[in-house]
Image (tube, rainbow, N blue to C red):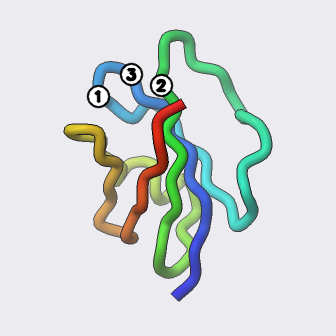
Amino acid sequence: MSQFYIKAWIVADEVVSAFCHGLPITQDPIQVEGATTVSAIGHGAYVHAGDLFPTLTYSNGVLSSPLCEITTEAPE
């Protein structure tokens, strides 16, 4: 099992954008006004952000996807 980093932008409990990569996230690829960013680590087979994004949900402070296990870090 591998791990990869995920950053998601959340507005009103909806994931509006996501970025994932096999290396630590060093900068935001976009800025979404009023969004909270959530950094997380995905565990499992690497998933491209374009495939992961439509499956991401955010509820009760938890970022999740059926494609991988996600460990959420503190919101920024």
Q: Which of marks 2 and 3 is in front?
A: 2
What amino acid is labelled 2 in the image? Thr
Examine the rendered structure and indicate whether residue 12 appears above or below residue 18.
above
Furthest-left residue in this view: 60
Residue at 54%, 53% (x, y): give it. 50
- The residue at which mark 1 appears reads as 13
Which of the two labelled residues, at mark 2 and mark 1, occupies the earlier sequence position?
Answer: 1
Q: Residues at badges 2 and 3 in contact (C-beta under 8 Å)?
A: yes
Distance between the alpha carbons at the discs numbered 3 and 1: 5 Å
* Element assignment for label 3: strand
Of residues 4 and 67, the one nearer the viewer is 4
- The residue at which mark 2 appears reads as 36
Residue at 39%, 70% (x, y): give it. 68
Q: Looking at the picture, how far across and down is residue 59, in whole percent?
A: 22, 40
Labelled disc at residue 11? 3
Q: Quadrant of the C terminus?
A: top right
Distance between the alpha carbons at the discs numbered 2 and 3: 7 Å
* Element assignment for label 1: loop
